Amino acid sequence: MDETYRSFLLMGLALMALGFALIVLPLIARWLPTDARWPKILVFVYHRDNFYFVTSPLLIAISLVYLAYFAWRSASG
């Protein structure tokens, strides 16, 4: 594989993993006990009526750092 496409491959795999996590987290949040307190940096759950929104600020931060790293790396060389 050409070296120039390797970063696209890794970024694509990371985005697929992030997408999978974002799809699975609401399903997991429905089975989690509501009295369990998770740190907000790991899992943030917002639920109102039948709407569940689950995100991980840590995953978002890691993804942004990863994206910035590859953007900086491709711009410098």
Image (cartoon, grey):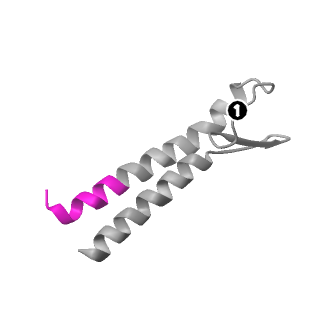
- Is residue 67 rendered to the left or right of residue 28? left
The amino acid type found where label 1 is placed reads Trp
Instruction: Report the residue at 57% width, 43% height from top.
Output: 23
Q: Position of residue 3 (x, y in %)?
A: 16, 61
SS at circle 1: loop
Image coordinates for residue 22, horizontal then vertical, percent? 57, 45
| Dominant SS in magenta | helix
Q: Position of residue 55 (x, y in %)?
A: 64, 46
Q: Which residues are magenta?
A: 1-11
Above or below residue 68? Residue 1 is above
Q: Residue at x 57, y 37 (%)?
A: 24
Q: Magenta segment: does it hold 3?
A: yes
Circle 1 packing at 10 Å, graded few (<14), some (14-19), many (20+), is few
23 relative to 40 in the view: left or right: left
The residue labelled by disc 1 is 38
For the N terminus, the image quarter is bottom left
- Vertical arrangement, residue 11 with respect to residue 26, above or below: below
Query: Relative to the observer, which residue lies in front, 76 or 30?
Result: 76
